[in-house]
C-alpha cells in the first residue's frame, strides 16, 4: 500500500489502576472505510476510542495521522486534525436548543449555524429542526444532532461508540444510509456495536478486541455472526435450547385499565392498559421506545403513583398508591433501562450500589450499614454474573456500560423476587453476556418468578416470552401467544396498523 | 481563550493536608505585600493574625468559643447540603433559637423556673427546627425554593428580634438599650475551663460531629441523603422519599442552628441583644463547604476559620490594622484554600481555537 493509513496506532497501551484496558494495540483506519471495533463488555473499545479522540492519553505507544506522529492531549487536538466522536452517553444540554448546543462547540453566528445544520441535514439525511429544544427530541434526533455537530468540523474520521444500542430499528436504517453517504464522500468511520448483523451489513473491516488486546482483523462480510462471536469471546458460542415453560401459576402482577396522563408535553399518555402476569411465565412488551415504555415502567415500579390504588396489583394487593420500597417489600424487583444515575449512583462504589435496593438483605443492623454483608453480596453478584471489575470498591461510573448492566441485573435477581420488571435487559450488553442474561431470566421463570420484559428487540422477546403485548402510542395490544404470532404481526401493531 | 477543569485521575488524600498548608503560605506572601503597601509592620500583623491565637491560653480558648457555634451549625447544614437541600438561612434559625431560649429567663428573671437551662436549650432547639421546617413545608407542598425561603425567613427573624428588644422584652432598667435583662445564673451554660469563656456548647458541637459522622458515613439514613444529592433519580428508583429528605435536611440544620443560638445567649452574651446576629449562620455555610461537607473535614475547617477570626480581632487591636485589611486577609486565605484545593483535584486545560 503506497498511501499511509489515515490513522495508525502502534503498540498503544492504557491502564486504569489495576485494569489494563488497552494493551499494545495496533490499528489502521483508511479513508473511505467503515471500520468496526467489536469485543465483549469491558474489552476496551470505549477506552481505545477515547485515546484516539484525545480524551485520555496512552501510557505508551504511538499514534500516526496521515503518516505523521501526533500527540493528542485533548479533544480539541483531535478535532483540529479532523477527528469527530459521538460518545456512548450523549453530551447535549437538554435546556438549550439544537443551535445553542452546537454553538457551544463551534464558532459562528446562530443564524449561519442554523443554516448549516439544515444544509447538512438535507445532504446526509440528518434532518432536525435547528431551533427545537433538545429535551423535546427523541433519542434518534439527539444522535443526529451529535453527528451534525461533528460534521460541522469537517472531520475525516468519525467515531461512533455504540450508536445503535439505543436506537429503534427504523432509526438504525436511517443512520446506516447516512453513514454510507459519508463513506461515499470519503470519510473514514470507526463503528462500535454489539450487534454483529449490523457490523456485517455496514462495515468493510473489523478489529476484534479481547481483554484489551487486538485478537483478530477480519472482513466481517466474509464471516457469519456466529464465527464473529467466536472471535470475540474466544470460544465456541454455546447453543442454548430452552426448556418449554410449565403452565403458569397464580397471578402476581395485574394492571387494570391503567390510564395516566402524560407528565409533560413530551411524554406519552397511557390509556386503558390491561395486563396479567403469572408465576412461572415471561411476558414481553414489544414496541419502539417512546411509545409509553418509560411511563409504564415507572407506574409499575412505583416511581410514578397511579391515579387509583386498584390500577396496579402486585401479589394480589392494590399498590397503585404505594412507593417503590413498599412494592419491593411485596417481592417486586426492577431493572430500569438507564443504568447511570437511576439503576446505579455513578459516584458510589459497587458495594454501596448494592445497598441501593438490596438493603433488605440483612445489610442493616438498626439502620447501620453492615459493610461486610454489603461487600459479600457485591462480591457474589460480581462472580455470579461475570461482572468484569477490579472488585466491590470500584466506582460504578468507571465501569464499562455492559458490565454495569450485568451488575444491576444481577443485584435485582439476587433479591429473589416473586415479580420482576426488566426494561431493555440487554441494551449495550455483548452477545455472550446477553445469552447468559436470557438464560438467567429463563431459569428464574422455571423457579416460579413472574417476569415482565420491555424490549425493542423482537428476537429476544420471541426467544424468552410465552405471551407478547405491543405498546404503541400509549395503548397496549391484547396478549398474543408467542408461539402463534409472527414478527410481521407484531410489526403491524408496532406501527399502529393493527389494534 | 476558554479553559476547563479536568478531574485528575488520582484524587490524592495527600491533597487534604497539603492544600491548607499551601494556602497559608500563599496568603502570607500576598498579605505581606498588602500590609507593607499599607505602611504597616507586616511581620507584626501576621504574628497577630496567625500566631497570637495560639500563644496564650486565653486567646486559644476564645478560638474554641468561636468554633463551637460554627462547628455545630455547619454540621447540621452539611447534612442538608449533601442531599441538595440548600438551607441558606441558618442565621434566621440561629436567631429564633436564641429568642426561644431567652423567653424563659426574660419571664423568670429570678431563675425560679425548674431545670431552666435544659429547658432553654430544648426551646432553642425546637424554635430553630420549627423555623426551618416552615421552608420544608413550603418546598414539599408548593415547590418553593428553600434557598429563597430560608434566606427571606432570616431577614424576618432579624425584624422579630428588633421588635422584641425595642418593645416587650427590653430591660426596664437597661437605660433604653435594646437588650433584655441579664440572665440569672441558672440560665447560663457551665464554663468548661476556668478563667475562660469557653463553655460546654463546645461539647454539644463535638457530639453533633460524632452524630453527623455516624449518620452520614455509616447509617442508612445518611446513605439515602447522599444518594438523593448525587443521583436524585436513583433515590426515586430505590424509593427513598424525596420529601422526607427535605424535611430531614432542613430540620437537622434548623435544630443545630437553634441549639447554637440558645448556647450563644446562655453563654458569652448572657442576655439577648442585637449582636446575637453576628453572622455565624452565614459563616457556617463557608465552614461546611471548606470542610468538603465531610463531618471530619468540618471539624478542621471550623477550627481554621475560628483562628482567622480571632487572629483578625487581635490584629486590629495590637497591630493597628484596619478592619477592612483583616477582612481582606480572611478572604485571601479562603480564596487560596479553595484555589489550591481545586488545583490539586483538577487540572486546568485551555481550549485552543477550533478551525471551523
Ligand atoms: N475511568 C476509568 N477508571 C477505571 N477503570 C476504567 C475507567 N474507564 C474504563 N475502565 C475499565 O477499563 C476496561 C475497559 O472499559 P471500556 O469502557 O473501554 O470497555 P468497552 O469495551 O467499551 O465495554 P462496553 O461494551 O461494556 O461498553 C473496563 O474494565 C473498565 O472497568
Ligand atoms: Mg463502551
Image (cartoon, rainbow, N blue to C red):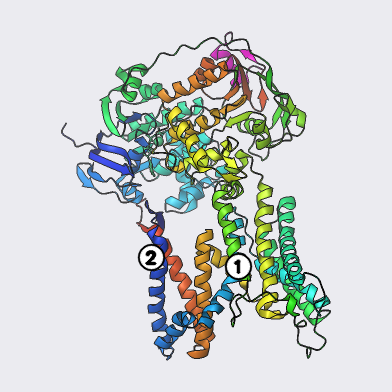
Image coords of residue A28 (percent x, y) = 24, 34
Residue A480 within the magenta-colored segment of the rendering: yes
Which quadrant would the N terminus of chain A be assigned to in this image?
top left
> Which numbered marker is on residue B203?
1
Instruction: Give the quadrant of the C terminus of chain A.
Output: top right
Q: Who's the residue at 75% across and 75% down the image? A: B161
- The answer to whether B190 appears left or right of A95 in the picture is right
User: The disc numbered 1 marks a residue on which chain?
Assistant: B
Q: Nearer the viewer, residue B84 or A208?
A: B84
Q: Nearer the viewer, residue A469 or A452?
A: A452
Residue A433 percent location from the top left of the image: 43, 25
User: Is B122 left or right of A375, judged from the image as shown?
Assistant: right
Q: Classify B111 as above or below A432.
A: below
**Picture coordinates of residue A117, whole percent (x, y):** 46, 43
Quick check: can you spot residue A183? yes
- Say which label, 2 or 1, has the lower sequence index: 2
Residue sitting nearer the eye, A269 or B288: B288
Q: Examine the image and state in which quarter residue B176 appears.
A: bottom right
- Location of ligand 2 given as a quarter of the image: top left
Q: Pointer 2: what residue? A: B18
* A489 in the magenta segment: yes
Q: Which residues are magenta?
A: A479-499
Secondary element type, mark 2: helix
Which residue is located at x 55 percent, y 74 percent? B64
| Host chain of mark 2 | B
**Counting other residues with Cα less than 10 Å from the Cα at mark 2, is it few (<14), some (14-19), or many (20 or more)?**
some
Question: Looking at the picture, does residue B264 appear above or below residue A200?
Answer: below
Horizontal and vertical percent for residue B143?
70, 52
- Quarter of the image for residue A300 reads top right
- Label 1: element kind: helix
Residue A68 vs A439, above or below: the answer is below
Residue at 41%, 37% (x, y): give it.
A400
Amino acid at each position: 500500500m503506497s498511501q499511509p493509513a489515515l490513522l495508525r496506532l502502534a503498540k498503544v497501551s492504557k491502564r486504569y489502576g489495576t485494569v489494563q484496558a488497552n494493551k499494545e494495540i495496533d490499528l489502521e483506519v483508511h479513508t473511505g472505510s467503515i471500520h468496526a471495533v467489536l469485543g465483549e463488555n469491558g474489552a476496551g473499545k470505549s477506552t481505545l476510542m477515547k485515546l484516539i479522540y484525545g480524551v485520555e492519553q496512552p501510557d505508551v505507544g504511538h499514534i500516526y495521522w496521515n503518516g505523521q506522529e501526533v500527540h493528542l492531549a485533548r479533544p480539541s487536538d483531535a478535532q483540529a486534525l479532523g477527528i469527530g466522536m459521538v460518545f456512548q452517553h450523549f453530551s447535549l444540554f437538554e435546556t438549550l436548543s439544537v443551535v445553542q448546543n452546537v454553538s457551544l462547540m463551534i464558532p459562528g453566528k446562530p443564524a449561519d449555524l442554523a443554516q448549516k445544520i439544515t444544509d447538512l441535514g438535507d445532504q446526509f439525511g440528518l434532518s432536525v429542526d435547528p431551533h427545537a429544544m433538545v429535551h423535546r427530541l427523541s433519542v434518534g434526533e439527539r444522535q443526529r444532532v451529535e453527528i451534525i455537530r461533528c460534521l460541522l468540523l469537517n472531520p475525516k474520521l468519525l467515531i461512533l461508540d455504540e450508536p445503535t444500542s439505543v436506537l429503534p430499528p427504523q432509526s438504525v436504517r436511517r443512520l446506516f444510509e447516512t453513514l454510507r453517504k459519508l463513506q461515499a464522500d470519503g470519510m473514514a468511520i470507526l463503528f462500535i456495536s454489539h450487534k454483529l448483523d449490523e457490523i456485517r451489513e455496514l462495515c468493510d473491516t473489523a478489529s476484534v478486541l479481547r481483554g484489551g488486546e487486538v485478537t483478530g482483523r477480519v472482513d466481517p462480510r466474509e464471516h457469519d455472526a456466529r464465527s464473529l462471536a467466536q472471535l470475540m469471546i474466544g470460544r465456541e458460542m454455546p447453543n442454548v435450547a430452552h426448556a418449554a415453560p410449565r403452565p403458569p401459576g397464580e397471578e402476581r402482577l395485574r394492571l387494570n385499565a391503567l390510564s395516566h396522563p402524560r407528565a409533560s408535553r413530551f411524554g406519552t399518555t397511557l390509556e386503558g392498559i390491561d395486563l396479567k402476569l403469572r408465576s412461572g411465565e415471561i411476558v414481553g412488551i414489544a414496541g419502539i421506545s417512546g411509545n409509553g415504555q418509560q411511563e409504564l415502567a415507572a407506574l409499575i415500579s412505583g416511581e410514578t403513583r397511579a391515579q387509583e390504588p386498584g390500577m396496579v396489583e402486585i401479589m394480589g394487593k392494590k399498590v397503585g398508591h404505594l412507593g417503590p420500597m413498599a412494592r419491593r417489600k411485596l417481592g417486586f424487583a426492577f431493572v430500569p433501562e438507564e443504568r447511570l444515575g437511576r439503576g446505579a449512583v455513578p459516584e458510589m462504589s459497587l458495594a454501596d450500589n448494592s445497598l441501593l435496593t438490596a438493603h433488605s438483605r440483612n445489610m442493616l443492623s438498626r439502620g447501620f450499614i453492615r459493610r461486610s454483608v454489603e461487600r459479600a453480596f457485591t462480591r457474589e453478584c460480581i462472580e455470579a454474573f461475570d461482572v468484569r471489575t477490579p472488585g466491590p470498591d470500584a466506582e460504578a461510573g468507571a465501569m464499562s456500560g455492559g458490565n454495569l448492566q450485568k451488575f444491576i441485573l444481577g443485584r435485582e435477581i439476587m433479591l429473589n423476587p416473586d415479580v420482576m420488571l426488566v426494561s431493555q435487559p440487554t441494551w449495550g450488553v455483548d452477545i455472550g453476556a446477553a445469552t447468559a442474561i436470557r438464560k438467567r431470566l429463563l431459569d428464574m421463570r422455571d423457579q416460579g418468578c413472574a417476569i415482565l420484559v420491555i424490549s425493542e428487540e423482537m428476537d429476544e422477546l420471541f426467544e424468552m416470552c410465552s405471551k407478547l403485548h405491543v405498546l404503541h402510542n400509549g395503548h397496549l395490544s391484547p396478549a398474543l401467544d408467542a408461539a402463534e404470532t409472527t414478527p410481521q404481526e407484531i410489526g403491524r401493531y408496532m406501527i399502529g396498523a393493527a389494534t | 481563550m476558554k479553559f476547563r477543569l479536568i478531574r485528575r485521575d488520582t484524587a490524592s488524600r495527600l491533597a487534604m493536608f497539603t492544600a491548607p498548608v499551601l494556602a497559608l503560605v500563599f496568603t502570607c506572601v500576598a498579605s505581606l505585600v498588602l500590609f507593607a503597601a499599607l505602611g504597616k509592620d507586616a511581620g507584626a500583623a501576621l504574628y497577630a493574625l496567625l500566631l497570637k491565637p495560639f500563644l496564650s491560653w486565653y486567646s486559644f480558648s476564645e478560638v474554641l468559643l468561636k468554633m463551637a457555634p460554627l462547628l455545630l451549625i455547619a454540621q447540621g447544614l452539611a447534612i442538608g447540603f449533601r442531599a441538595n437541600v440548600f438551607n441558606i438561612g441558618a442565621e434566621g434559625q440561629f436567631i429564633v433559637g436564641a429568642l426561644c431560649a431567652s423567653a424563659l429567663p426574660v419571664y423568670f428573671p429570678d431563675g425560679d423556673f425548674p431545670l431552666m437551662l435544659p429547658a432553654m436549650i430544648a426551646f432553642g432547639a425546637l424554635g430553630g427546627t420549627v423555623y426551618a421546617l416552615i421552608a420544608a413545608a413550603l418546598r414539599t407542598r408548593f415547590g418553593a425554593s428553600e434557598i429563597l425561603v430560608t434566606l427571606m425567613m432570616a431577614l424576618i427573624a432579624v425584624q422579630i428580634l428588633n421588635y422584641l428588644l425595642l418593645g416587650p422584652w427590653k430591660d426596664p432598667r437597661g437605660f433604653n438599650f435594646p437588650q433584655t435583662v441579664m440572665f440569672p445564673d441558672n440560665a447560663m451554660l457551665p464554663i468548661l475551663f476556668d478563667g475562660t469563656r469557653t463553655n460546654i456548647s463546645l461539647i454539644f458541637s463535638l457530639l453533633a460531629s460524632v452524630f453527623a459522622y455516624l449518620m452520614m458515613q455509616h447509617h442508612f439514613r445518611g446513605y439515602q441523603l447522599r444518594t438523593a444529592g448525587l443521583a436524585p433519580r436513583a433515590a426515586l428508583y430505590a424509593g427513598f422519599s424525596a420529601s422526607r429528605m427535605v424535611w430531614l435536611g432542613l430540620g437537622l440544620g434548623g435544630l443545630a442552628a437553634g441549639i447554637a443560638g440558645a448556647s450563644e445567649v446562655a453563654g458569652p452574651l448572657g442576655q439577648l441583644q442585637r449582636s446575637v446576629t453576628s453572622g455565624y449562620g452565614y459563616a457556617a455555610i463557608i465552614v461546611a463547604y471548606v470542610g468538603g461537607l465531610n463531618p471530619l473535614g468540618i471539624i478542621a475547617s471550623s477550627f481554621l476559620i475560628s483562628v482567622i477570626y480571632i487572629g483578625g480581632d487581635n490584629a486590629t487591636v495590637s497591630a493597628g490594622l484596619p478592619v477592612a485589611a483583616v477582612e481582606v486577609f480572611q478572604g485571601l486565605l479562603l480564596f487560596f484554600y479553595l484555589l489550591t484545593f481545586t488545583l490539586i483535584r483538577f487540572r486546568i486545560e485551555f481550549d485552543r481555537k477550533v478551525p471551523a
